[in-house]
Image (tube, helix red, strand yellow):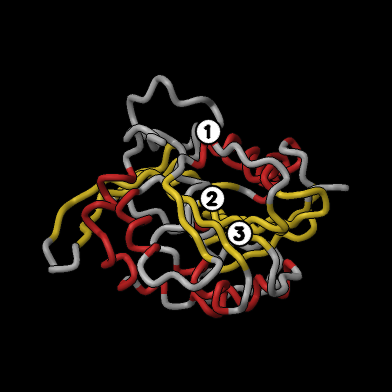
Amino acid sequence: MTGPARDHWFEDLADHLGSAYLRYSFTKGTRQEVAFLVEALGLEPGMNVLDVGCGPGRHARVLGELGIRVHGVDISERFVEIARRDAPEGVTFERLDARRLAFDGTFDAAISLCQGAFGLADGGPGSPDTPLDPDGEVLDGIARAVRPGGRVALSAFSAYFQVRWLDPENGSFDAERGVNHERTEIRDESGSPTEVDLWTTCFTPRELRLLATRAGLSVDRLWSVRPGEYGANPPDLDHEEFLLIAHRPD
């Protein structure tokens, strides 16, 4: 079956990064994040979890080591190829556009972390085909993918944090769309650099609750977190991300 067309700006970025993605500091807290989510979502060995925007598969691999079955999806073929290498038993990966998820009640839980899909759906500047709320489409698909009673964990970049620590020299913030644009340098496995544009949609707690409710989810918790330091912190201005915990009602 033919995979999705290459129509997302993130794919070229991922092609250049490859496995060098796993050198970045924000990936070093994967085990702490998984341990927290296992408790927050009530995950147990044998359960089926969907990892949306899985990247090179770092969360899926750790969950697989705990006996949890995981299916990871990512729009980047390069990342999917890396994720498949020596994947634990019961952990599979597929190239798939998170804006077009077609699962229906298949999973006990779903996760979308570290802006792997949710928060990256905006097409950047000059994208007339981008809907008003493309990330809402991602969350709609995630909500459908879990069975009634199934749980969802979703991280999103904080609009509060982004505006508070805005760096005009390296980017800009679109106040109308809530999208932060950053021009930055990334390096591949050999250290070869290239400059890329990043567009990350930022959210407030209220927006996340409204999106989740519209998607048919019931919100259980909403915390402020940062990579590698997931915890039950009330929403604040000081953490980079929000972590939404919700479930699909019976």
User: Which of disc 3 and disc 2 is earlier in sequence?
Assistant: 2
- Which secondary structure lies at badge 2? helix
Question: Which labelled disc corresponds to residue 134?
Answer: 1
Q: CA distance from mark 1 to mark 2?
A: 17 Å
Tell me which residue sits at (69%, 74%) in the image.
Answer: 45
Amino acid tagged 1:
Pro
Q: Quadrant of residue 23?
A: bottom left
Residue 32, given in percent of the width and then of the height, sits at 56, 79
Mark in the foreground, 3 or 1: 1
In the image, residue 159 sits, relative to residue 32, either above or below, namely: above
Q: CA distance from mark 2 to mark 3?
A: 10 Å
Amino acid tagged 2:
Ala
User: Which of disc 1 and disc 3 is earlier in sequence?
Assistant: 1
Amino acid tagged 3:
Phe
Question: Which labelled disc corresponds to residue 242?
Answer: 3
Mark in the foreground, 2 or 3: 3
Is residue 67 found left or right of 84 in the rendered image?
Answer: right
Residue 216, given in percent of the width and then of the height, sits at 77, 39
Is residue 42 found left or right of 155 in the rendered image?
Answer: right
